[in-house]
């Protein structure tokens, strides 16, 4: 696939229906949790998108959990753009924002821990994360038998 100019930016209202589709396409394959459109509107400011000549080809969110902790979530890259570094670029942009905000740690729950480890994340026991994060887990059909891996990065 021929690529144009890739650009990372904050999500806009007009992006949300496509972000919804991209995330829920992954959710149908049980690669991430589905997100209702109403939740995406509420958390729109968490999201970064990658666009290629105006077409959204990737998405990732930085969701603040507490004063020193955030989660990288909803990382999804269009199938035709996978393995091109877009996922890493999006996660690194979230980490940059986390540093700018003064956060100390960022975690992710993932089926692909090695992807995050290449960026500097380390394995962590899910049980060591604060109970506040389990709100999303309660909506998951796999709860309490979660098979995702928890990874974390210290930013200081």
Image (cartoon, rainbow, N blue to C red):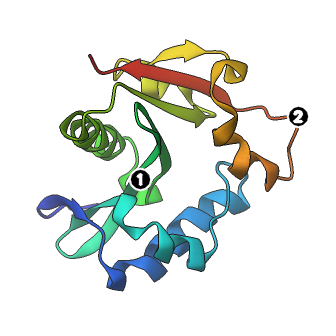
Depicted 75 relative to depicted 102: above or below: below
Q: In the image, residue 4 lies at what x, y percent?
A: 14, 64
Residue at left offset 70%, top offset 32%: 148
**Mark 1 surroundings within 10 Å by alpha-carbon count, few (fewer than 14), some (14 through 19), many (20 or more):** many
- In front: 102, or 81? 102
Residue ID for mark 2: 145
Disc 2 on helix, strand or loop?
loop
Q: Badge 2: how crowded within 10 Å, few (<14), some, or many (20+)?
A: few
Residue 19 x %, y %: 46, 71
Q: Is residue 2 left or right of residue 152?
A: left
Q: Where's residue 2, x and y in %?
A: 21, 62
The answer to whether residue 94 is left or right of residue 133 is left
130 or 63: nearer the eye? Answer: 130
The quadrant the N terminus occupies is bottom left
Q: Residue at x 47, y 82 (%)?
A: 17
Point out the tag, 1 or 2, that comes first from the N-terminus.
1
- The reply to whether the C-beta atoms of the residues labelled 1 and 2 are less than 8 Å apart is no
Q: Compute the Cα span from label 1 to label 2.
A: 24 Å
Q: Which residue is mark 1?
A: 61
Q: Quadrant of residue 15?
A: bottom left
Q: Where does the C terminus fall, quadrant-wise?
A: top left
Q: Residue at 47% across / 77% down in the picture?
A: 41
**In the foreground, 40 or 54:** 40
Depicted 53 relative to depicted 33: above or below: below
Left or right: where does residue 14 sit relative to residue 21?
A: left
Q: Residue furthest bottom?
A: 14
Horizontal side of 146 relative to 88 (left or right) equals: right
């Amino acid at each position: 696939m021929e690529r144009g100019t890739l650009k990372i930016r904050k999500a806009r209202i007009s992006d949300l229906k496509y972000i919804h589709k991209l995330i829920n396409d992954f959710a149908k394959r049980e690669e991430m949790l589905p997100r209702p459109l109403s939740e995406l509107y509420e958390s729109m400011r968490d999201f970064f998108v990658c666009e290629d000549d105006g077409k959204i080809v990737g998405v990732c969110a930085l969701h603040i959990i507490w004063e020193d902790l955030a989660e990288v979530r909803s990382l999804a890259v269009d199938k035709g753009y996978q393995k091109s570094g877009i996922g890493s670029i999006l996660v690194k942009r979230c980490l940059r924002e986390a540093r700018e905000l003064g956060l100390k740690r960022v975690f992710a729950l993932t089926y692909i821990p090695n992807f995050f480890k290449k960026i500097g994340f380390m394995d962590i026991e899910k049980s060591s994360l604060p109970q506040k994060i389990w709100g999303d887990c309660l909506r998951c059909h796999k709860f309490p038998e979660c098979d995702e891996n928890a990874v974390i990065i210290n930013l200081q």
